[in-house]
Amino acid sequence: SHGNSADYEAGTEPIKTGPGHCVVVAPPAATTSSDDGKDSYKRTALFPWGKTRGQKFEDKTVVSERACKHLRNLQSQLNEDVTPVVLFIVNRSDCESVRACREKCPVFAEVLADVVKTGVKALAVRVRWTEEGECFFDGVVPVTV
């Protein structure tokens, strides 16, 4: 499988193995300068990740029709008494943030940006796994919309 739900630092990315293989290289903004003047790469988790397989949302091809529907449903719940939240679980301890994978599904990225603009909150937590298969909370990470 080519499923890697995170980006790569420029120069470390694998070679594409075919037309359906997507490799996402972090933009320069994902690299920050540290106190010693060296650039430091910050890995970003990506969602959704997968193939479109003929799914449609609002007449556009998507990776996950269900994910887009969930966002619109959260948006429909907005009122003065309710603040809906989409919660991303980052299942990789090497990621410092999460963002919509517009390279795989630009529609999801657009819908996420739209619902956040209208008041839906986008939050993310990271988990880490032990060698024994136990899962632990590993902090809150920012969602880039």
Image (spheres, rainbow, N blue to C red):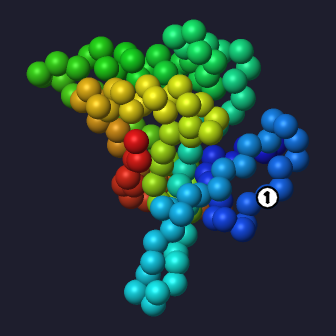
Question: What percent of the width, then of the height, locates residue 111?
Answer: 43, 25
Question: Looking at the image, which is closer to me, 17 or 133?
Answer: 17
| Left or right of residue 129, residue 127 in this image | left
| Left or right of residue 114, residue 132 in this image | right
- Occupied quadrant, residue 57: top right
For label 1, the residue is 14
| Left or right of residue 88, residue 6 in this image | right
Question: What percent of the width, then of the height, locates residue 106?
Answer: 56, 31
Give the residue furthest to the left: 80
Residue drawn 23% across the image and 20% down it: 78
Residue 130, placed above or below residue 75: below
State the quadrant of the C terminus: top left
- Occupied quadrant, residue 47: top right
Residue drawn 83% across the image and 49% down it: 16
Residue 1, placed above or below residue 60: below
Question: Is residue 129 visible in this depiction of the protein?
Answer: no
Q: What's the amino acid at mark 1? A: Pro
Question: Looking at the image, which is closer to me, 2 or 137?
Answer: 2
User: In what element is the residue under mark 1?
Assistant: loop
Question: Is residue 92 visible in this depiction of the protein?
Answer: yes
Question: What percent of the width, then of the height, locates residue 77?
Answer: 26, 16
State the quadrant of the N terminus: top right
Give the residue furthest to the front: 28
Residue drawn 46% across the image and 72% down it: 32
Question: What percent of the width, then of the height, locates residue 40?
Answer: 52, 75
Residue drawn 48% across the image and 49% down it: 98
Give the residue furthest to the top: 59
Residue 28, placed above or below residue 44: below
Residue 40, placed above or below residue 145: below
